[in-house]
Structures are given as structure tokens and as C-alpha cells.
Image: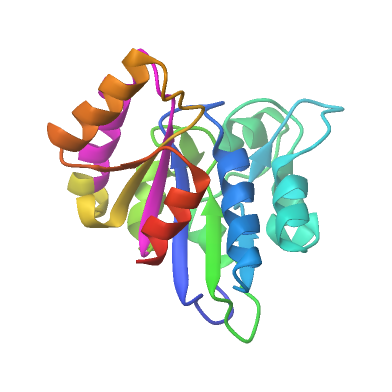
Amino acid sequence: MNGPRPARLWLVAGTGTDVGKTWAACELARLACTRGLKVAARKTAQSFAPGEVGLDAQRLGEATGESPGRVCPEHRWYPVPMAPPMAAAALGMAPFGLAQLLAEIAWPSPAVDVGLVEQAGGLGSPHASDGDGVDMARLLAPDAVVLVARPGLGTLSDVSLASRALAGEAGIGPDRLVVFLNRFDPGDGLHAANRDWLTSALGLQVVTGQDGLLETLLR
């Protein structure tokens, strides 16, 4: 990474694709900004369908007041809807490693209060030719990981496997992991039961609203 490390470095990961990582990261950034905190967001690579609008780097840039090219280097924009290293290969571009991606992260100077790094896809998705999201978490060594997950059926397995991988392979234990159940409906019995199981049986920190997420991360 280039530039001074943010006072707080948070990694926004997901149990899979389309769980709402970018939305969660943007809302978290906006809330932190309303508290008077200086926030920067980064995404090491993004892939997308040709002609797609509202790309992740654009949305994150709007939330933090940065240009999309600052959020994600433009040479890491891949117009193929595959995991970034697969998209690069499909386009005939050179392979890249995790260390290379992380070295391209440039933080503002002076140091910001909060630095957000949003991953691509799920934790088990390839992020580079030599590693996935868990490997990135290990190398980045964030102060906290926000694991975005669905609140309904299947989330117990997804979150359990993801938390075990983070703890065992990346050294991110429950004290540095916050599970965010996106689109949580307190009136849905399954959603509530899943939240309670994750907290009581697995001992995880679970939040269901953006205000609660920011408060938990700022403790």
C-alpha cells in the first residue's frame, strides 16, 4: 500500500456475490462522513458487463467524494462479468498477484480516519491468480472485517464457513469480525432466528442496521 495507513482500516467482504457489499460499504462511508470522519474507499479490481452503469468504483467514489479512478485504478477495470483474474485472462491481459493489487492501493495523505477496502465477489472467489478473498484479508491485515451476508436460508452455513476460514487462514478472529445481515427484516422469524443462532451458538458479532454497524466498528 502507498500513503499513510488509515487510522482504522476496514475490509468489506461477502459470503457471496450480490449480497450487497457495495451498498453496505457506501452507506457505512456516508454515515462515517456525517460523523465528521475523513473516509477513503478502495477496490483493488472490478469486473462488469459491457455497458453496465453504476459501477462499484463510481458508487464508492460518490459516497466518499473521490474519483472512480482513485477508488479503483482504471487498468483494473475489466469489462467481462467474471472474477477479476478470469476476466483479465479472457481479455488476453497479463495475470496479476495479490501483492501487486495491494501495492497499487494509494491512501490519501495525511492519513484518513477510515479506510474501506471492498472485495470482489465472495471470500472464496479468486481475487488474483494466486489467492482469494481470505488470502487478501491475511495480507491486508485490516483492523476489522465486515462480512456482508443474506439474512435468510443458507446464511448459517455461509457465515460459519466464512468465519472459520477467516479465523484459521487469515487470523481474523471473532473480535475483529462483524457480520452484517443485509436486508434484515425484524418481523421475519427466520431472519431473527438466524441472527440469534449466529450470536449465541457461534459467538459472532452480528448487526442488522447501518447505524449499529458503524457503532460496533468504532468501539
Expressed as whole percent of the image width and height from the top left, the position of residue 106 reads 63, 71
> Quick one: 129 or 68, which is closer to the camera?
68
Q: Quadrant of residue 157?
A: top left
Question: Along the horizontal axis of the image, is 200 left or right of 71?
Answer: left
Q: Nearer the viewer, residue 58 or 39?
A: 39
What is the x, y in percent for residue 145?
38, 52
**Count of residue discs:** 0
Q: Nearer the viewer, residue 171 or 173?
A: 173
Q: Against 37, is 140 above or below?
A: above
Q: Considering only vertical position in the picture, is 150 above or below 209?
A: above
User: What is the x, y in percent for residue 11?
Assistant: 45, 54
In the image, what residue occupies the spot 33% across and 14% down? Answer: 189
Q: Residue 23: in sight, yes or no?
A: yes
Q: Position of residue 213 (x, y in %)?
A: 44, 50
Specify whether residue 160 is painted magenta.
yes
Residue range (magenta): 143-166
- Left or right placement of residue 3 versus residue 164 in this view: right
